Image (tube, rainbow, N blue to C red):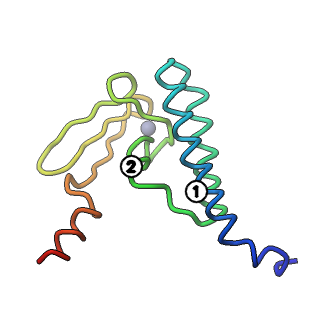
Amino acid sequence: MSRRNTGNKKIQKSIAKNRIQRLFRLAEEHALCDRFELSDRYVFLARKLSMRYLVPIPAKFKRRFCKHCYRYLLPGSNCRVRIHRGKIVTYCRKCKRYTRMPLRDISTKSKLNKKC
Ligand SMILES: [Zn+2]
């Protein structure tokens, strides 16, 4: 049974990656129309896809949902974003918890190291 899908793994992963991106785009569209139940559902499905096919969620989408309650975050409506001591501090209004991320991105850090 486990041998059945071994050849398709690359294709499966690329499909899962595309679907994750599409789901996050849809989540943003619905959040802008004030339909947060749907965008939360899309985040849930995107996370399930990433876990099942071992595809990481792209860095730009990682900040779009709460790490504690997995709700879709739209700054100005259900979350607050501040910069404090070199960190991006996101406050989720649903679960009332904070998420802190370093201001400098990991991808830019690696580029800087290559130049030096
Ligand atoms: Zn939350």
Secondary structure at numbered mark 1: helix
Characterize the local packing of mark 2: few (<14), some (14-19) or many (20 or more) Cα atoms within 10 angstroms.
few
Image quarter where the C terminus lies is bottom left
Q: Which residue is mark 2?
A: 60
* Residue 70 position within the rendered picture, expressed as x and y whole percent measured from the top left: 51, 42
Circle nearer the N terminus (2, 1) = 1
Query: Mark 1: is the Cβ under 8 angstroms from ligand 1?
Result: no
Locate residue 43, reporting x and y percent.
56, 41
Q: Residue at x 20, y 56 (%)?
A: 104
Left or right: residue 55 versus residue 89 is right
Residue 59 position by quadrant:
bottom left
Q: Is residue 62 above or below residue 11?
A: above
Q: Amino acid at mark 1?
A: Lys
Which residue appears farthest toward the top when viewing the image? 33
Q: Is residue 76 left or right of residue 109?
A: right
Query: On the image, numbered disc 1 is attached to which residue?
Result: 17
Q: Nearer the viewer, residue 22 or 34?
A: 22
On screen, residue 106 above or below 40: below
Snapshot quadrant of residue 2: bottom right
Residue that appears at 46% across and 22% down: 32
Q: Residue at x 56, y 21 (%)?
A: 35
Quadrant placement of the N terminus: bottom right
* Residue 45 place in picture, x, y as percent: 64, 45
Question: Type of residue at label 2?
Answer: Lys
Tell me the element at label 2. Answer: helix
